């Protein structure tokens, strides 16, 4: 998704296509052949950004499950030079450079503070990969230390929030609290521009505890659709699209406790484990309607006025 990330700090969307196991992104013990990567840095407070910044947000479910997020290197050595310079990271990256590049782009975006970068040089091709930080949800880990549990959970939730099964641009608002307790910055303009409460995301891909998504009420009718289909439901109560390894758990309120702000959840509990979640909001215009004159990627041909049989927009099936 070449998408709008909300300037202040985020911009999620996500694409899907499943792979193996619900562990996520890296067998990251990873390394060897590191290029001009930065030296470890001291953790810093995330910077407050202001309003929208264009950015892609279409992590694939392949990326979400790529070789497990059992960070044999990165989780212990930190998302810094030490973590990127291990033999384990090098082996992981070389197993599928294109997918590993995608995973690292979102991993660094979620975990590393805005303005910082992480760099890796492929030892065979000599290609230099540079990934830019944005949200700063894991400042301890980004500083070169092992990721605390709350940072593991927030990075996992952030990765999940970037998944999109259709690989199209969907600007979103991402809300929640950092591991240190401060709210991810937002503005009233941002909330007003993204009035649709979409989903909650939580889990821990580092530990193999899984990654989960829930819906925040009935977002769609039978004639409406959204490219953010992994955790939205229509008035039938059904999930629109399965996005393994992301597991749909129903309404967020069944598992999560609202924050005092009322805008997001303070915690979610699933399988007797408590997680720090993130929630997403959408713009009105990103809810598509059969009959609006455009055959959206989320709509199908047919003979009715439903999103999956949309005669007015997509015509009859041949």
Image (spheres, rainbow, N blue to C red):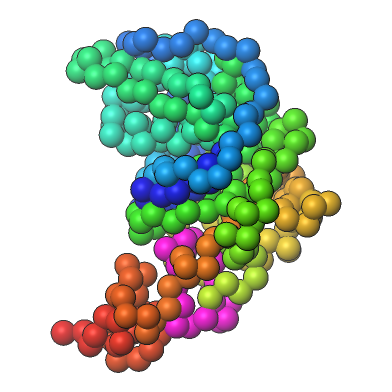
Quarter where residue 227 is shown:
bottom left
Q: Quadrant of the C terminus?
A: bottom left
Q: Please give the name of the residue rendered at 78% of the width and 57% of the height, measured from the top-left corner.
A: 262
Q: Please give the name of the residue rendered at 34% of the width and 75% of the height, measured from the top-left corner.
A: 299
Provide residue 34's location: percent of width, then percent of height: 36, 12
Q: Is residue 136 magenta?
A: no
Q: Please give the name of the residue rendered at 36% of the width and 70% of the height, measured from the top-left corner.
A: 298
Q: Is residue 227 magenta?
A: yes
19 vs 161, nearest the viewer? 161
50 vs 141, nearest the viewer? 50
Provide residue 249's location: percent of width, then percent of height: 61, 61
Provide residue 153's location: percent of width, then percent of height: 64, 38
Provide residue 125's location: percent of width, then percent of height: 20, 18
Q: Please give the name of the residue rendered at 63% of the width and 38% of the height, measured from the top-left corner.
A: 154
Quarter where residue 132 is shown:
top left
Residue 137 in view in this figure? no
Residues in magenta, as a range: 221-238
Number of numbered discs visible in the structure rendering:
0
Magenta segment, principal secondary structure?
A: loop
In the rendered view, tell whether residue 220 sits above or below residue 310. above
83 vs 129, nearest the viewer? 129
Quarter where residue 312 is shown:
bottom left
Residue 236 in view in this figure? yes
In the visual, does 136 lie left or right of 230?
Answer: right
């Amino acid at each position: 998704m070449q998408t709008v990330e909300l300037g202040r700090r985020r911009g999620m969307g996500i694409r899907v296509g499943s792979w193996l196991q619900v562990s996520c992104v890296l067998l990251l013990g990873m390394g060897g052949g590191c290029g001009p990567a930065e030296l470890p840095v001291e953790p810093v407070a995330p910077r407050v950004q202001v309003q929208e910044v264009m950015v892609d947000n279409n992590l694939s479910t392949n990326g979400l499950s790529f070789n497990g997020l059992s960070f044999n290197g990165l989780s212990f050595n930190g998302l810094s030079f030490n973590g990127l310079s291990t033999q384990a990271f090098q082996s992981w990256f070389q197993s599928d450079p294109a997918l590993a590049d995608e995973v690292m782009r979102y991993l660094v975006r979620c975990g590393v503070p805005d303005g910082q970068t992480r760099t890796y040089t492929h030892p065979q091709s000599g290609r230099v990969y540079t990934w830019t930080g944005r949200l700063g949800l894991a400042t301890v880990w980004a500083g070169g230390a092992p990721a605390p549990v709350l940072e593991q959970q927030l990075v996992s939730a952030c990765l999940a929030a970037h998944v999109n099964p259709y690989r199209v641009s969907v600007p979103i608002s991402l809300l929640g609290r950092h591991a240190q307790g401060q709210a991810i910055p937002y503005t009233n303009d941002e909330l007003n521009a993204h009035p649709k409460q979409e989903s909650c995301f939580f889990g821990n891909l580092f530990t193999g505890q899984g990654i989960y998504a829930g819906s925040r009420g009935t977002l769609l009718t039978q004639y409406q659709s959204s490219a953010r289909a992994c955790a939205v439901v229509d008035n039938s109560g059904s999930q629109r699209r399965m996005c393994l390894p992301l597991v749909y758990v129903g309404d967020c309120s069944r598992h999560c406790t609202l924050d005092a702000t009322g805008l997001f959840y303070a915690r979610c509990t699933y399988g007797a484990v408590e997680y720090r979640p993130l929630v997403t909001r959408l713009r009105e215009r990103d809810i598509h309607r059969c009959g609006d004159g455009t055959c959206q990627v989320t709509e199908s041909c047919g003979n009715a006025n439903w999103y999956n049989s949309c005669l007015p927009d997509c015509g009859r099936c041949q």
